[in-house]
Image (spheres, rainbow, N blue to C red):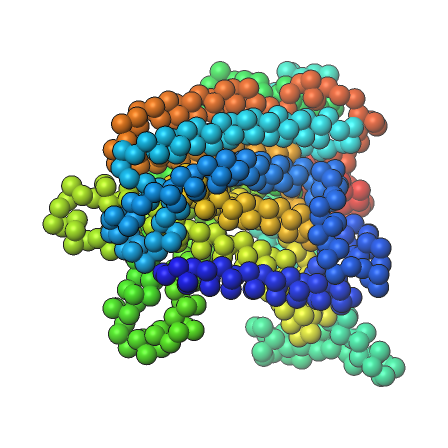
């Protein structure tokens, strides 16, 4: 890529962002699109547009995002979202404070030397990118006294990261504590999850076993237990019943629409009873679905009783009348053997992964290690195609491998666009295939809650991204370009890789720019969700439930968003001293991300769970991992360019490990469990324990009829009414 192509790519990305922002301003002002651009506000009963649509400034969303407080974010999207913005603000602060010193100090130091002129082949850019090489360490002569400035800069970035991440940890700890001390009743604070139940003694049911065990330990505060059951069959029946209800609602909506169109009696919808309605007897759809619902309801009620009495498994949820006891129970050792009576905090009702609750202790451990091995193999073997893609998707290499493309790619306009975006787009598309697979792997580990699965998948995705993108692209591109040199002189591999770093900075600058200009432009404009919504509404949706399903936005997707952010901070940190010009692009990425996602959090996304900041220790660990990788990279780079005082950098990674250890010892336990001083705060009202209990009952086990309240089994006195959500 030439310097002109690099500037063209940045300009094109900026223009695309402006176009997408103008599209957002225009489209979001149309009332028919309100459910796409303001669903969170609509679901909370608020007006989509603050101050009215007619007087609304086209750029009002920027003012609203900037003026919003942390409490506004919490009110609209919860603690987890507020913690995510603490992360964005912390990383932004690290880059801004680092950049002020590095840009003012290192750019003049690098640009006034002349190593690039002396040795035009010292970088992988091979003389075609000298204008940017002159602003990096590639332009500093080996063993030059100027390297002192770059060495000191390594410690400055580290110090800024320590200070700001410490403040952020304290802030998030306070947010979590305040949320858990809230006088509002939260069902999960009165429950614990009990796994690895021992075998039941003869003549005793599983529920009797659990009740007697916890009554003997907590005689005054034990309330009730809910034994986990094998719900496979009842879930299938319930899903089929819900399907018929949706079909009935859709059919009734079609019938009502026919009446509104002028036919006073309307046209009764009909369907065939065979497979997918393709064959069989023609029947009245409304009558047919009502009859199916009646039969399936009876079938469901019968299966519910069988499930509750005969399909009890080796796990349970236990409820207490106060949250201090629940917090104590979750942190206590209840049995001498580690694989018996394992008690942990109960996840939120909406987070529970029921099929994972009954997986035994040692099976969970085996699964976990098997998943780790599988992830490791995936990383290793994925690195091969990613390295290959990073190597061949340069324009020059494509011309060599596919000669028939020369007439096309040699056209000036096409050549400029391909040089600017081809490798980065190929990489982004390739990475987009991975998240669902990692979520699946995390789930089969036996993790009991949805938020924990997302944290686990996010960690896997981070390691994958760093190893395959940051390291894989650097190594892959360099080896492809210098293969003959390495074959002739194998000992030159390490110096070649080290000296390729400044040249590879240009690839990553374009990668970051593409992510924030185009990525956040698409995020803000919501073009794809808008098109999908209108197509579904016009051709597929008939009932109100179907329309709502078409526009419902989902959550902020931490499983992919957080690792992507972590990859960017890793790239920017690792290149911050080698090529300081990358820092402004990192600042733009996180500043624009803060602004755009602030708008989305306040108006668009609806949280699917609340973990009260449990993602933060994961974020902090990855920030420290990025810092450690940066320090090791700089230590190796200074060594390769033969700076005599390189050993001065040896304490840097040691300090990072020590800092991480101190943070973990001081803060981490409060994120694993609820501190008793937090749980002991008074509630504003006496909790309704029956509502708390009902909130954990799976939908497929809630009786259809209120009069069917009493039947013995894994639970009792259960009613569909009054469900606590």
Decide if residue 274 is on the left or right side of residue 64: left
Where 483 falls versus 218 (above or below)? below
Decide if residue 404 is on the left or right side of residue 616: left
Residue at image coords 51%, 64%: 12
Q: Residue furthest bottom?
A: 263
Residue at image coords 25%, 68%: 401
Let me know if residue 446 appears in the view.
Answer: no
Which picture quadrant has residue 238?
bottom right
Location of residue 248 in the rendering, given as x and y in whole percent from the top left corner:
73, 67
Q: Residue furthest front?
A: 112
Residue at image coords 57%, 36%: 93
Which quarter of the figure is the C terminus placed in? top right
Where 346 falls versus 131 (above or below)? above
Q: Between 572 and 710, which is closer to the camera in this rendering?
A: 572
Location of residue 588 in the rendering, given as x and y in whole percent from the top left corner:
56, 48
Residue at image coords 38%, 54%: 131
Location of residue 500 in the rendering, given as x and y in whole percent from the top left corner:
30, 47
Location of residue 373 in the rendering, given as x and y in whole percent from the top left corner:
34, 40
Let me know if residue 179 appears in the view.
Answer: yes
Q: Between 353 and 704, which is closer to the camera in this rendering?
A: 353
Which picture quadrant has residue 657?
top left
Q: Tag count in the figure?
A: 0
Which quarter of the figure is the N terminus placed in? bottom left
């Amino acid at each position: 890529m030439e310097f002109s192509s690099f500037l063209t790519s940045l300009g094109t990305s900026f223009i695309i962002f402006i176009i997408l922002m103008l599209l957002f301003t225009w489209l979001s002002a149309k009332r028919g699109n309100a459910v796409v651009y303001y669903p969170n506000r609509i679901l909370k009963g608020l007006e989509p547009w603050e101050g009215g649509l007619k007087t609304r400034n086209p750029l009002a969303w920027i003012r609203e995002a900037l003026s919003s407080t942390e409490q506004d974010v919490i009110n609209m999207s919860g603690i987890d979202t507020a913690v995510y913005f603490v992360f964005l603000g912390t990383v932004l602060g690290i880059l801004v404070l680092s950049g002020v010193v590095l840009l003012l100090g290192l750019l003049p130091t690098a640009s006034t030397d002349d190593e690039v002129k002396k040795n035009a082949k010292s970088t992988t850019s091979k003389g075609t990118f000298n204008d940017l090489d002159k602003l990096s360490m590639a332009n500093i002569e080996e063993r030059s006294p100027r390297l002192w400035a770059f060495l000191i800069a390594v410690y400055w970035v580290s110090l800024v990261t320590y200070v700001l991440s410490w403040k952020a940890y304290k802030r998030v700890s306070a947010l979590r504590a305040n949320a858990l001390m809230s006088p509002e009743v939260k069902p999960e604070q009165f429950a614990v999850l009990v796994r690895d139940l021992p075998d039941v003694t003869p003549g005793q049911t599983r529920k009797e076993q659990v009740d007697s065990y916890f009554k003997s330990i907590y005689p005054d505060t034990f309330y009730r237990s809910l034994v986990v059951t094998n719900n496979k069959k009842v879930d299938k029946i319930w899903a089929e019943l819900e399907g018929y209800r949706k079909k009935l609602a859709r059919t009734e909506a079609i019938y009502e629409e026919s009446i509104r169109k002028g036919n006073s009696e309307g046209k009764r919808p009909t369907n065939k009873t065979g497979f997918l309605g393709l064959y069989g007897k023609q029947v009245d759809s409304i009558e047919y679905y009502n009859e199916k619902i009646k039969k399936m309801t009876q079938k469901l009620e019968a299966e519910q009783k069988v499930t509750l009495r005969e399909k009890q498994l080796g796990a349970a949820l236990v409820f207490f009348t106060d949250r201090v006891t629940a917090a104590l129970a979750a942190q206590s050792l209840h049995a001498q053997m580690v694989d018996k009576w394992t008690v942990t905090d109960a996840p939120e009702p909406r987070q529970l992964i029921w099929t994972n609750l009954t997986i035994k202790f040692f099976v969970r451990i085996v699964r976990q290690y098997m998943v780790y091995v599988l992830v490791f193999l995936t990383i290793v073997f994925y690195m091969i195609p990613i390295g290959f893609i990073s190597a061949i998707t340069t324009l020059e290499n494509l011309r060599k491998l596919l000669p028939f493309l020369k007439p096309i790619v040699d056209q000036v306009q096409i050549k400029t666009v391909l040089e600017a975006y081809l490798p980065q787009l190929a990489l982004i598309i390739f990475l987009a295939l991975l998240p669902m697979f990692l979520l699946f792997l995390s789930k089969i580990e036996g993790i009991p809650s949805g938020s924990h699965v997302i944290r686990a998948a996010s960690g896997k995705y981070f390691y994958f991204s760093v190893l395959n993108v940051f390291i894989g692209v650097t190594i892959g591109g360099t080896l492809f370009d210098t293969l003959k040199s390495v074959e002739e002189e194998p000992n030159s591999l390490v110096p070649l890789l080290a000296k390729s770093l400044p040249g590879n900075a240009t690839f990553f600058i374009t990668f970051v720019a593409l992510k924030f200009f185009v990525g956040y432009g698409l995020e803000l404009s919501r073009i794809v969700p808008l098109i999908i919504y209108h197509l579904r509404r016009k051709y597929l949706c008939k009932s109100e439930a179907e329309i709502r399903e078409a526009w419902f936005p989902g959550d902020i997707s931490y499983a992919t968003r957080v690792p992507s952010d972590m990859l960017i901070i890793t790239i920017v940190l690792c290149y911050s001293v080698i090529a300081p010009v990358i820092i402004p692009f990192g600042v733009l990425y996180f500043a624009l991300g803060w602004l755009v996602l602030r708008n989305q959090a306040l108006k668009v996304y609806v949280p699917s769970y609340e973990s009260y900041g449990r993602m933060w220790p994961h974020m902090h660990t990855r920030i420290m991992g990025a810092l450690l990788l940066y320090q090791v990279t700089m230590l190796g780079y200074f060594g390769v360019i033969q700076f005599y005082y390189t050993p001065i950098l040896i304490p840097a990674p040691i300090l990072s490990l020590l800092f991480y250890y101190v943070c973990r010892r001081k803060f981490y336990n409060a994120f694993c469990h609820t501190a008793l001083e937090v749980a002991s705060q008074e509630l504003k009202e006496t909790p309704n324990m029956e509502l708390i209990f009902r909130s954990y009952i799976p939908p497929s086990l809630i009786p259809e009829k209120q009069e069917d309240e009493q039947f013995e089994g894994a639970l009792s006195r259960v009613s569909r009414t009054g469900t606590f959500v």
